[in-house]
Image (cartoon, grey):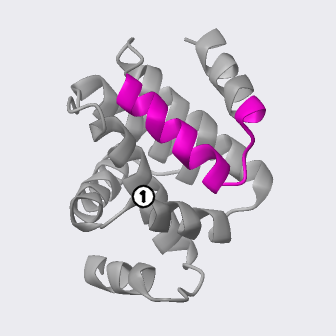
């Protein structure tokens, strides 16, 4: 499954992902963001599991399995651009705002904003078609709920 997704993402003109593959790509993006500061903390892992369970109606074990698959995909994937393009193509604009909020939840999960995580957020948000202003508003909503 992972090899198939990687092959499709690497194609010159990739086809839109299936909903299941888009879910895996989003999970891999969450993992990539959590790993971007070199500290893949337990609190970030737990937050990813909770986000996946909530977003997709998964049981805890199913969310952990999806995260494990996403970790494998993220480790093999060449770049963030392809994940982001796949998510943008598979998810409508309003849901992409939810994706940005989920990403900010991972950035803020460990209580510290790292410059590598911030840099990745500045890269990913516009590639998802989300303005800096909307990304900052999403961050503020997440911070208000912590």
Does residue 132 show up magenta in the picture? yes
In the displayed structure, 106 sits above or below 22; it is above
Task: Give percent across and percent down for residue 21.
Answer: 47, 73
Task: Give percent across and percent down for residue 90.
Answer: 64, 70
In the displayed structure, 4 sits above or below 24; it is below
Query: Residue at (46%, 34%) from the top-left corner?
Result: 119
Classify the position of the C terminus by image quarter.
Answer: top right
In the displayed structure, 118 sits above or below 91; it is above
Q: How many marks?
A: 1
Q: Which secondary structure dominates the residues rendered in magenta?
A: helix
**Relative side of 91 to 48, left or right:** right
Task: Give percent across and percent down for residue 63.
Answer: 37, 50
Is disc 1 surrounded by few (<14), some (14 to 19) or many (20+) residues within 10 Å? some
Residue ID for mark 1? 80
Viewer-closest of 99 and 46: 99
State the SS at label 1. Answer: helix
Query: Residue at (47%, 68%) from the top-left corner?
Result: 82
Using the rendered view, name the quadrant where residue 73 is placed.
bottom left
Viewer-closest of 51 and 99: 99
Start-end of magenta stretch: 115-134
**Relative side of 32 to 87, left or right:** left
Query: Residue at (34%, 78%) from the top-left corner?
Result: 6
Classify the position of the N terminus by image quarter.
Answer: bottom left
Query: Residue at (55%, 78%) from the top-left corner?
Result: 17
Does residue 109 show up magenta in the picture? no
Viewer-closest of 86 and 55: 86
């Amino acid at each position: 499954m992972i090899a198939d997704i990687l092959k499709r993402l690497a194609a010159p003109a990739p086809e839109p992902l299936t909903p299941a593959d888009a879910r895996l790509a989003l999970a891999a993006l969450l993992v990539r963001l959590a790993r971007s500061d070199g500290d893949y903390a337990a609190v970030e892992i737990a937050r990813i599991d909770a986000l996946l369970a909530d977003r997709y109606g998964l049981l805890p074990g199913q969310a952990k399995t999806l995260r494990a698959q996403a970790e494998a995909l993220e480790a093999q994937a060449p770049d963030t651009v392809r994940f982001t393009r796949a998510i943008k193509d598979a998810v409508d604009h309003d849901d992409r705002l939810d994706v940005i909020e989920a990403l900010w939840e991972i950035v803020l999960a460990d209580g510290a904003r790292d410059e590598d995580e911030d840099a990745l957020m500045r890269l990913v948000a516009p590639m998802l078609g989300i303005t800096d202003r909307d990304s900052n508003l999403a961050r503020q909503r997440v911070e208000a709920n912590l």
